[in-house]
Amino acid sequence: MTSAASRKGGRARDERLERDIPEATIARLPVYLRALTALSERDVVTASSEELATAAGVNSAKLRKDLSYLGTYGTRGVGYDVNYLRYQIAREIGLTQDWSVVIVGIGNLGHALANYAGFASRGFQVAGLVDNDPARVGEKVGDLTISSFDDIDAIVSNAAVSIGVIATPASAAQDVCDRLVAAGVSSVLNFAPAVLTVPDYVDVRKVDLSIELQILAYHEQRKANGAAELRASLA
Amino acid sequence: MTSAASRKGGRARDERLERDIPEATIARLPVYLRALTALSERDVVTASSEELATAAGVNSAKLRKDLSYLGTYGTRGVGYDVNYLRYQIAREIGLTQDWSVVIVGIGNLGHALANYAGFASRGFQVAGLVDNDPARVGEKVGDLTISSFDDIDAIVSNAAVSIGVIATPASAAQDVCDRLVAAGVSSVLNFAPAVLTVPDYVDVRKVDLSIELQILAYHEQRKANGAAELRASLA
DNA sequence: AAGAGTTTGTGAACGGGAGAACAAAATCGC
DNA sequence: GCGATTTTGTTCTCCCGTTCACAAACTCTT
Ligand SMILES: NC(=O)c1ccc[n+]([C@@H]2O[C@H](COP(=O)([O-])OP(=O)(O)OC[C@H]3O[C@@H](n4cnc5c(N)ncnc54)[C@H](O)[C@@H]3O)[C@@H](O)[C@H]2O)c1
Ligand SMILES: NC(=O)c1ccc[n+]([C@@H]2O[C@H](COP(=O)([O-])OP(=O)(O)OC[C@H]3O[C@@H](n4cnc5c(N)ncnc54)[C@H](O)[C@@H]3O)[C@@H](O)[C@H]2O)c1
């Protein structure tokens, strides 16, 4: 990205906007944001990288390096101004604007998501709930009413939805995803245990409960084996 | 781990058991397993690394390397025997045995989890549902009845629970986690947006919806900026 | 039995991220 | 104003994971 610099009269940019930030850093920024919000609510004005890092559960060197990608928002010998840094991270992530979200598949999980207060509080507005089961259409969930899957295009364009959440069975996930993309959604959060294929410009993230459990199971098994071997070697 | 080899009479181990498998590989094994299960259900007997990789949404070289950590289960010129490989991966992850799970916090999300069929079908048995709200205790969810939080020790020891799932508000998460660990749980899956501190031997994994959304928002913003810059440069 | 064709398993090169360590920059005490 | 102290921003090194590329190993055909 050199467009700003290449534009006529573009002055040297000491701001670090649109420097490409490592994926790993981006994934941690929300954690920092949460820690900062917690500090702010306790009326803490300033925090050192050490304190922040502890609150976020990371190494302080890593935190400082992460923040350095955004700009130099700290003060040496002092630390970071909590509210200022919080704003800067929020701006970087794109949380100074609201994002509209549509949830597809209002079953067990979809209901929980639809009722989840943590969406709105972080700037994500649920603009629509969609299900293809005619028996479900019309049901009220919180403030919203479940719409037919056919209304998806209207919902996406009316509310400028850019993020779609898939909470349907795995068998329907790819179809649903295709429809979402066709409707104009360019980011997808997938709860179904399925591999989604999308065009390049679409981002997909998945949340997969059973993968997480299986990873834990692997480590449990190792611990159990280790303990068994230890007992055997002591015998 | 050299205990087996160092044990008296331990013969040379051509099996690759307890070779330490990279974390990144472990996280993908469940995906391969799912792909293999799908193939098996379609009565596919053999699959090449290329086919498997496509089904799992990864690069075939990566898949082969991942599988090579487990052993040499493929046949050159042919591919992998679907059922055989499936069994080997399941064994490696620890899915040849069942795992007992306790869910803490049966609110919106906890209900969805408790009703989730995907647990049992993958060898994870819900051994108990726990909530500290007296009004909730006694309520039936599926086959199970919600127990008081005080029963946690009994549940964990009776059912040999090793995995705890936290679905309480963030403010309660650390307390709940401490209680779980004290009761004997050594793996935790945390849905609450909170950083958990645990002893070394305890594994924690987190599922954080709002982090996922914020990561998507960041990329959405970048796409939007990119498009805006493109328009500006064309003007 | 040998050659052509496939596909695995892995060595090697590469890239990105983690952490240690330190110079630079700010504050504070006097 | 200046030295002591604190804490950031960044450089450097190391490690892990990804990908390429190819020899080895297997099947199939003739
Ligand atoms: N329930 C959980 O706790 C949980 C946990 C992890 C993952 N998941 C996954 O989330 C997904 C949903 O789980 P659930 O328990 O809510 O299932 P569910 O069966 O209760 O709900 C699925 C909903 O999707 C709707 N649906 C089906 N096909 C559709 C389509 N083509 N278009 C629109 N809507 C459609 C159904 O009508 C239903 O309402 C599944 O893929 C599941 O594996 C669920
Ligand atoms: N609902 C969602 O879709 C969703 C999505 C992502 C994350 N989360 C997170 O999951 C957690 C639960 O969300 P929810 O919507 O189900 O909330 P909820 O308020 O509906 O449920 C929380 C439950 O935990 C119980 N609880 C509170 N303190 C407890 C304690 N000390 N011991 C045992 N039980 C306790 C409450 O009685 C309640 O039943 C929250 O941290 C939330 O941020 C929820």
Image: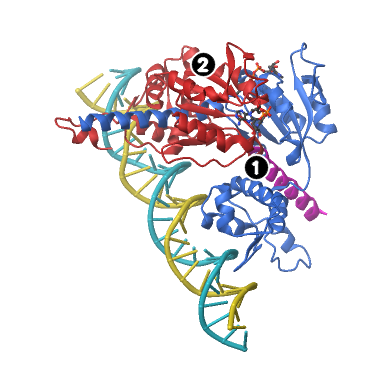
Chain colours: A blue, B red, C yellow, D cyan
B228 inside magenta stretch: yes
Query: Which quarter of the image is occupied by the N terminus of chain A?
Result: bottom right
Q: Residue at x 44, y 32 (%)?
A: B186
Residue B22, image x, y percentages: 40, 38
Residue B88, image x, y percentages: 37, 22
Q: Which residues are magenta?
A: B212-235
Residue D15, image x, y percentages: 39, 50
The amino acid pointed to by label 1 is Ile
Q: Which mark is residue B215?
A: 1
**Contact (CB < 8 A) between labels 1 and 2?**
no
Q: CA distance from mark 1 to mark 2?
A: 31 Å
Does B66 sit left or right of A144 as displayed? left
The quadrant where residue A117 appears: top right
In the rendered image of this protein, does residue A197 appear above or below residue A57? above
Mark 2 nearby-residue class (10 Å; few <14, some 14–19, many ≥20): few
A55 inside magenta stretch: no
Which residue is denoted by mark 2 in the rendering? B120
Does B64 sit left or right of D5 as displayed? left
Q: Which chain hosts label 2? A: B
User: Circle 2 — which element?
Assistant: helix
The amino acid pointed to by label 2 is Ala
